[in-house]
Each structure stands twice: as C-alpha cells, then as structure tokens.
Amino acid sequence: MVGTRLTPQRETELYGTVLDLLREVGYDALTMDAIATRTRSSKATLYRQWGSKPVLVARAIRCNKPDASQVADTGSLRGDLHAMAALADDARMQRDVALMRGLFHAVHGNPDLHEALREVMVEPDANGLQVLLDRAVVRGEIAVDHPALPFVPHMLVGAFVARQLIDDRSVDRAFLVAFLDAVVLPALGV
Amino acid sequence: MVGTRLTPQRETELYGTVLDLLREVGYDALTMDAIATRTRSSKATLYRQWGSKPVLVARAIRCNKPDASQVADTGSLRGDLHAMAALADDARMQRDVALMRGLFHAVHGNPDLHEALREVMVEPDANGLQVLLDRAVVRGEIAVDHPALPFVPHMLVGAFVARQLIDDRSVDRAFLVAFLDAVVLPALGV
C-alpha cells in the first residue's frame, strides 16, 4: 500500500471509524494509535495521508456532513431547504448532536483542531447550504447584501444546540422544518 | 448562623464564588467541600439552603443572568431588545460563553443538573426576555400565536454558541444588536 492513496470507499469507512471512536472516547483521549488499530491501517499511512490528528478528525466530520449540494434545484429557496431537511436522518442527527457537544468542548483547548475544522467548513464544495443560498440570490429571491444572509449558519447551528439545551431533545426533521419556516425563511424575507 | 438565612448580599457573593469555581474546575470536579472552603461556609449551611450541588449551581447561574425584566418599557420591542443589549457587558458575555461551554458538556452526563437548570430558567421572574415578548404581544406588535415566538430563546442561545463555534469570537454588544436587527426582529415580523 506504500505510496498508494486509499480508495474513496476505504476512506469513507475510515472516517466512519474515526467518528465512532470520537463519540466513544472524546477528542482528547482519541489517539492515532487507536485509529490505526481499529481501522487496521498503519500509523505511517494515517500521517502520510492526513498529517495530524486534528486534520484527520476535521476531514471525517466534513465527510459526515449531509451534502446539501446534492439537492436538486426545486425553483425556490423554501423548496430547496425543505428538500435538504428531507435528506436529514433523525437517528443520525441525534448522533451528530453528541458529536458536536464533544467538539464544542474540545475546540476550546485545541486551537489546531478549531483551525482544521474551520478550514474544511469553508471549502466551497463542503458547504452545500451556501450553494442553496447562492442559488436563491441568483434567482432574485434574496438580495446579495441581505443582512440576514451571513447569519444563516448561526441560525442553523443554534437550532441544533439550543434544541438540546432548552428542550432536552435532539433536532428531528419536524423541528428542522418548523424552524426553517418560522425563523430562517422569514428572517431572509422569503 | 444556624437557622438564619443568608443575607441577599452574602448570597450574591456566594453565587459569584460558585461560578468562579465552575469556570476553574468544571462541573464534574466541583465539590461542595471546595465551595464551603472558598466561601467560608459550612457544608451543612450549603445543604440546608440548597439541598444539592446541581440546585446550588443552577441558582448561581440564574443569579448571573442579566435581568431583562429591569428594562423599562421603551414603547416598542425593537427599543426594548436594544435596551437589553445595552445592558450587556462584553467582558461578562465572554466569561459566560466559557461557562455555557462547560455546562453544555456537563448537562449531558448529569440529568439532575439539567433538571435544576430547566427549573430556574422557566421561573417567570428569571426570564426577563419573556417579559419583553409578552409586552410586545400586549402592545399588539406580535400575535400571541406567532410561529417564531417559541423560537426566540433558540435564536439567542444559538447566536452565542454559533458565534464562538463559527467565528471563533465571543458575542459582543455590536454582534448582538446586528443579530437582533437582522434575524430576531424580522423573524417576528417586527
């Protein structure tokens, strides 16, 4: 395997295992040794391909994100966002909240993790939500300088965290749709 | 001191010390012994007055919340919310985000803490925000069944958490005002 890249399928499997370990032990206790053992890879392979633990973790998180860029153009932002919500899987969102809780804690003490996460999150193809918003701007549904546009990620991240903190429940598809209709779309004037 | 209640001033001081300790060591490592030592109280006094660690911590958090119910009626929800934002102290909000980060982590493994926090948060006099929203409903600015009303706490909690997670910055007064004007008020149709 030396010198060869992992196949995309093998890469996705490996990312899944990294997230499993992350949920089990948390970021700080996660070691490259444990990842190597569980994924039956060599540590050399892991370091060659990703360089460091924070970068590997950030890539795994990014791979796990629902890919909103796969949402076909429905002709309206409301339709596109509802289609994105329909892609969401309730059990998966529940798992993701646990993951976010751990990461929110971990980024505080690990600036390199925070940096790696920010880097993958701003990659254009990683950010399907931005694709949907750009489409709405091109369509003329939202002005490019609409004051609520920069806050859409804050609204959505906030919905996930606050649902847990205030209501002690995970976000499910029904909550997501209600939040989109009552908050996100009206704030955007759509 | 047996049988007497603490004075309100002494109580506020004690809550401040609990929050200091909470920021220093986190919820799980916080002990009633450490609180008793630092506040020069007896553990018997602490247990008599609060009953348990989660209840004491929840009361301390509640005491620390900016009291939006002190905001005088400005005649509009926009005016009231801006007045609330003007009460906010940038340094204090920065400290509070650190506190929330720790608690978001702690409530997961401590259902009794979660329960105690929820109880103090829903107390009517603890929830100044609700006072401002109720005022707007009475004024006729917002319909009592407006779909965005139940989500206002989610929007605000979300703003604090997401600002940190996405922008790696604490909420300051300027961000809070921008978020109120771009998201909260338009979502409420005000």
Image (tube, coloured by chain):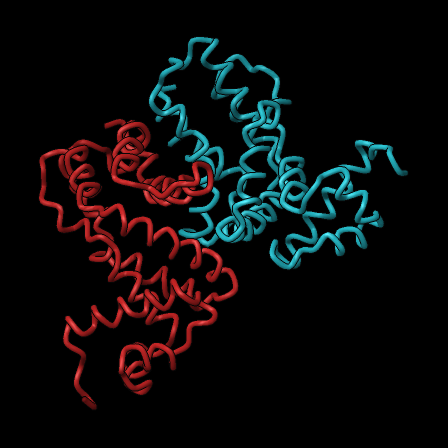
Chain colours: A cyan, B red
Above or below, B23 against A176 in this view is below
> Which residue is found at the position 53% from the left and 43% from the top?
A114
Q: Is residue A128 above or below residue A143?
A: below
The residue most toward the bottom is B2
Q: Would you say A156 lies left or right of B84 here?
A: right
Q: Residue at x 61, y 48 (%)?
A: A95
Q: Residue at x 49, y 58 (%)?
A: B105
Q: Residue furthest right?
A: A1
- At x 58% / y 39%, what residue is drawn? A116
Q: Position of residue A86 (x, y in %)?
A: 58, 30
| Nearer to the camera, A71 or A26 | A26
User: Is B5 on the left or on the right of A10, as rendered?
Assistant: left
Residue B20: x and y in percent read: 33, 65
Residue A183 vs residue A13, the one in the foreground: A13
In the image, residue A176 sits, relative to residue A78, either above or below, namely: below
Q: Is residue B4 above or below residue A77?
A: below
Quadrant assignment for the C terminus of chain A: top left
From the image, which quarter does the N terminus of chain A lie in? Answer: top right
Q: Which image quadrant for residue A188? A: top left
Residue A57: percent from left, percent from top = 65, 44
Q: In the image, residue A49 lies at what x, y percent?
A: 76, 37
Image label count: 0
